[in-house]
Image: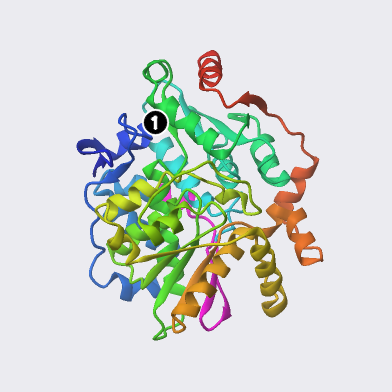
Amino acid sequence: MFLYSTNNPALRVTFKDAVFQGLPPDNGLFMPLEIPQLPAGFMEALPGLSFQEIAFVVSQKLLHAAIPDADLQTIIENSVTFPAPVVSLDEQTFILELFHGPSLAFKDFGARFMAQTMSCFNRDESRELVILVATSGDTGGAVAAGFLHTPGIKVVILYPSGKVSPLQEKQLTTLGANITALEVAGTFDDCQALVKRAFLDSDLRQAIRMSSANSINIARLIPQMFYYFESWKQLPKADYPTVFTVPSGNFGNLTAGLMAMQMGLPVHRFIAATNANDVVPKYLESGEYTPRSSVPTLSNAMDVGAPSNFARMLDLYGSTWNTLRSCVSGYAFSDEQTREAMREVDTNYGYIMDPHGAVGYLAFRKFQSEEPDARSVIFETAHPAKFLEEVEAILGHTIEVPERLAVLRKKEKQSVSMPADFRVFKEWLVAHY
């Protein structure tokens, strides 16, 4: 498997090099040179395949022997260890629960697959690997859980101070061992900019062996394709055109879906659901892409004003606005609309959604007003208990807290305060690694 940069189609790197580099030196993003079609009959055979079997076939086809089959099988067995069940609200509305992993967020799939892949590739390396990751909430917890105690790898998580939920913060800051949390005085975009700049800094690249665990890393996107096929397998047979509704921030999740469609997943359309950080829905409406500083919202993991994976979305469709919007619709909603949707789903269906999933629910209902015959798989990307205070206040009743979250309340936060200043960040990295 070879990859190129979205900024340089002539560039060629191996999958291993792309995983460890994280970001090309030209500040583009790595993309597969080829997105192959899945084997004939794969979709018809899907109902009889386990989640792990699906993951193996999809990744084996895409990776083109970049990982030996025996190693790939081990990676899958050690990373795809929890389910992604589909729950029906009504005959046209389905919820894909992606919060059954160790950090109770969809990013567990990508983080665990990437940790296992890096560990496999890192076996013969003598130098320590430092993983840099920016998080607006869920990524950091998933990466911390996925890489905890991985030999030869240390993780540095940058998160915006005061802009993640209390339980999300505890997931980032209480593990210790090879995990360090930097509490940045700024926004997620500031954190992401620090990470990207670190990879482009030649001094740091020479001094420290670094990689990324954000969705800018291609190893994060590949496993996010798996649960598109897993959810399709669980849907009842029907004549409804099927859309996937994806709450979106950095747009890695939706990009993985677009790649899955190119491999053969029969999708009618994708719905990009955002909060007030609506640069992609505005682009789909007008053709003008205007990134801006992110604004804080109730659905904080989607508070991204300059989504990295937008470059990949454009690359998949030849940077053509009309082509991209022919298969992706975009909608944005306010916090108050999100609260109303959470109460509506709780009242009408007895189902508790987190704020991100509720934005997805709103987006599908909006799309359904335009295409009433459609059915959708709505991604529920995090367990509602991760936003306990907000969810209980909105719904007016208590909700169950999983034990692995409840125990975090008693743990003491340990973080390093950091200004949104690259010079300070660089000096800290050099001093510690």
- Counting other residues with Cα less than 10 Å from the Cα at mark 1, is it few (<14), some (14-19), or many (20 or more)? few
Q: Left or right: 183 with respect to 412?
A: left
Asked if 294 appears above or below 381 in the picture, the reply is above
In the rendered image, residue 270, in percent from the top left (x then y), is placed at: 41, 66
- Report the residue at 36% width, 34% height from top: 23
Q: Secondary structure at mark 1?
A: loop
In the rendered image, residue 364, in percent from the top left (x then y), is placed at: 51, 72
Part of the protein shown in magenta: 75-97
Number of marks in the rendered image: 1
Q: Left or right: 306 with respect to 99?
A: left
Inspect this view and state whether residue 232 appears.
yes
**Amino acid type, mark 1:** Arg
In the rendered image, residue 394, in percent from the top left (x then y), is placed at: 76, 63
The residue that disc 1 covers is 123
Asked if 137 appears above or below 58 in the picture, the reply is above
- Report the residue at 66% width, 42% height from top: 163
In the rendered image, residue 91, in percent from the top left (x then y), is placed at: 53, 84
Q: Left or right: 354 with respect to 62?
A: right
Q: Quarter of the image for the N terminus: give it.
A: top left
Asked if 289 appears above or below 242 in the picture, the reply is above
Residue 35 among magenta residues = no
Residue 86 among magenta residues = yes
Please state which of residues 406 and 380 is positioned toward the viewer in this rendering.
380
